[in-house]
Image: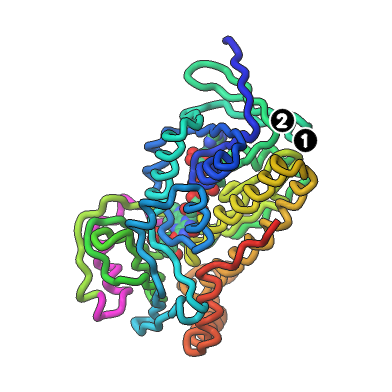
Amino acid sequence: MFLQTIKTQVAIIGAGPSGLLLGQLLAKQGISNIILERVTGDYVLGRIRAGILEQGFVNLVREAGVGARMDREGEIHEGFAIAVNGKLTHIDLKGLTGGKTVMCYGQVEITKDLMEARAAAGLSTYYQTSELALHDVNAEQPSVTFNYQGQAYTLSCDYIAGCDGFHGVSRQTIPQALRTEHERVYPFGWLGVLSDTPPVSEELIYCHHERGFALASRRSATRSRYYLQVPLTEKVEDWSDDAFWEELKRRLPAELAEQLVTGPSIEKSIAPLRSFVCEPMQYGQLFLVGDAAHIVPPTGAKGLNLAASDVATLYAILTRVYQQGDKACTSRYSEIALRRVWNGERFSWWMSNMLHNYQGMPVADMGSLTFKRFMESELNYYLQSEAGRRVIAEQYVGLAYESV
Ligand code: RFL
Ligand code: PHB
């Protein structure tokens, strides 16, 4: 097979939101980059995931010049609600944080906007690559080899951004002895349904219920996204649409359950819940970004937002490298990124513990009655106190990005 050699400044592995946003921002600064993706663009767009974007993320998308549709179609949310066994408490994000809000705009839409902007700018993305491997990441001139349309390629570059998600190859390139992986797998998953029905509420409602957690989210005035806590043993095929709606009604506050508009699901899937952090997030010229380095359970709406803060940090560092010749600043990436990551991890873990029901789980998995009582007490305390609600609000809207 003939070997093609190509060259760029930054090789980006993965065309998820992390890779696409980083690529767009770097290109704005005149830093060349090539994205290598394992699957097709349509496959990437088929993954229904996040819906809530922090202001920092929104600003970054605007800075990348890709915010026009988001600003037109996205919804600004000034608050959300937490229901405890049917009783609602409002978390006034705007009032409690001195004016901060979040944007409700689907990950699929952001990804689509970024893909279109990349194509329009003529930036190069290789979809459906295989056999991808990273080489010499600890040397001055690393490279990535891969196959594309039956042809073997070598991409030589200055830096590699590993934006290839939890199951990607980048993280595995860091020698095992040099990385520490922290992991907690939760003893339940989220069954999610997307439907073209008017959402039950204008704001999101996180429901703590004896039968298990539920979340009422949305994508627009006509599209709803709902989730139910289910045991990990559950199969999505065993959940008919009717069964899903019935269970959701049981967990929603009664007055909302009565108003719930049901309809056929357009997507239905089960996602396991995991907390995961890889330390450090860099090795030589390789930087891990987003889900490649960390995973949070979705209860705090933080996964994509942490990916965005990694992108912001790496973008600032690489801009400094290429515009000021300050190569030494690259050594600060992991330390800066991890500080924010650990806060998001702690918040997501805490929200997950308070809002889910661990009853029936092994005691080692926090299934004891004592743990249940601690969590009920914690939730009640934080909801009835304004200071408590502010603690939730401040972290939900997202901490400020650290400068490089
Ligand atoms: P992604 O999206 O996984 O993209 C990685 C890309 O890398 C490609 N890849 C490879 N490419 C080339 N070679 C290889 N060897 C490769 N291996 C993998 C993959 O095909 C893929 O295209 O990671 P990225 O870009 O870091 O983005 C992270 C986000 O997707 C994730 O954090 C969020 O979706 C998490 N999340 C949420 N985050 C929020 O901030 N707010 C939310 O409201 C929110 N809700 C959620 C969520 C995640 C969920 N699930 C299903 C896990 C709700 C759910 C249900
Ligand atoms: C979603 O709309 O998919 C969503 C919203 C908030 C979360 C998790 C998921 O915390």
Image coordinates for residue 354, horizontal then vertical, percent: 51, 75
Secondary structure, mark 1, is: loop
Residue 187 in view of the camera: no
Residue picked out by circle 2: 142
In-image side of 159 versus 17 (left or right): right
Query: Is residue 238 found inside the magenta-colored segment of the image?
Result: yes
Magenta residues, dominant SS class: helix
Q: Quadrant of the N terminus?
A: top right
124 over 259 or under it: above or below:
above
Image coordinates for residue 209, horizontal then vertical, percent: 39, 76
Residue 61 in view of the camera: yes
Q: How many marks?
A: 2
- Report the magenta residues as a range: 230-256
Q: Quadrant of the C terminus?
A: bottom right
Q: Are marks 2 and 1 in contact (CB under 8 Å)?
A: yes
Residue type marked 2: Pro
Q: Residue furthest top?
A: 2
Residue type marked 1: Asn
Q: Quadrant of residue 43?
A: top left
Front residue of 143 and 359: 143
Image coordinates for residue 46, horizontal then vertical, percent: 37, 43
Q: Residue at x 57, y 69 (%)?
A: 347
Q: Residue at x 32, y 57 (%)?
A: 73
Image coordinates for residue 313, horizontal then vertical, percent: 64, 53
Residue 138, label in figure? 1
In-image side of 120 versus 238 (left or right): right
Front residue of 274 and 65: 65
Q: Residue at x 50, y 42 (%)?
A: 20
Front residue of 22 and 193: 22
Any atom of ligand 1 within 8 Å of the CB at mark 1?
no
Q: Quadrant of residue 324?
A: top right
